[in-house]
Amino acid sequence: MTENPSWNEIDKILREIEIMGKKFFAEKGITLSYIDLWRWDVPETAFWWVDSAGINKRICFTVDESGEEYSVRASGSAWMDSRETMRRKWLGVTFTPLLIIGGSDISDYVRRYLLDFFVAIFQKVSVIEEKDLVNAAPLQPMPDM
């Protein structure tokens, strides 16, 4: 299997987001439950944490490439599972992509806009409350631990 040559370039952007995210969450004093890094066929980096109300929150970044342009897409989600009702309540949000033109080299200028993009997404997802979780779906039975 031949590796997609643009994956190395995409990985540079995702690694920058990973480093930025770890630093951001550490400065906020938020313990991450999980950081998901792409290593299969989906170029993404995702951060997952649980807020003080017990709501799971996740922000995910993907990168698409077209020539010398890279599009950083972001989505966020929040959810709560209930063993009593066997339902998951959730909400998903998407954002306008950030376009990086001129290749994957991360200048201080691009780094600043990536950070602004990251912070805006975090702020939108971090304020989601239980009352905002307007979607619901049944859960599969959970085994007793």
Image: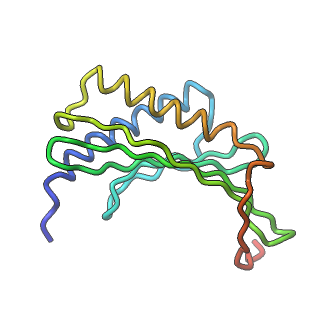
Q: Considering the image in quadrants, where does the C terminus appear?
A: bottom right
Q: Position of residue 109 (x, y in %)?
A: 29, 20
Q: Position of residue 113 (x, y in %)?
A: 37, 26
Q: Position of residue 140 (x, y in %)?
A: 70, 78
Residue 110 appears in which quarter of the rendering? top left
Left or right of 58 on screen, residue 16: left
Q: Nearer the viewer, residue 3 or 144?
A: 3
- The residue lying at 38 percent from left, 50 percent from top is 62
Q: How many marks?
A: 0
Left or right of 39 on screen, residue 118: right
The residue lying furthest to the front in this view is: 96
Q: Position of residue 141 (x, y in %)?
A: 74, 79
The residue lying furthest to the right in this view is: 84
Considering only vertical position in the picture, is 126 above or below 143? Answer: above
Q: Nearer the viewer, residue 55 or 32?
A: 55
Considering only vertical position in the picture, is 31 above or below 136? Answer: above
Q: Considering the image in quadrants, where does the N terminus appear?
A: bottom left
Left or right of 81 on screen, residue 64: left
- The residue lying at 76 percent from left, 40 percent from top is 52
The figure's colour scheme reads: rainbow
Left or right of 35 on screen, residue 129: right
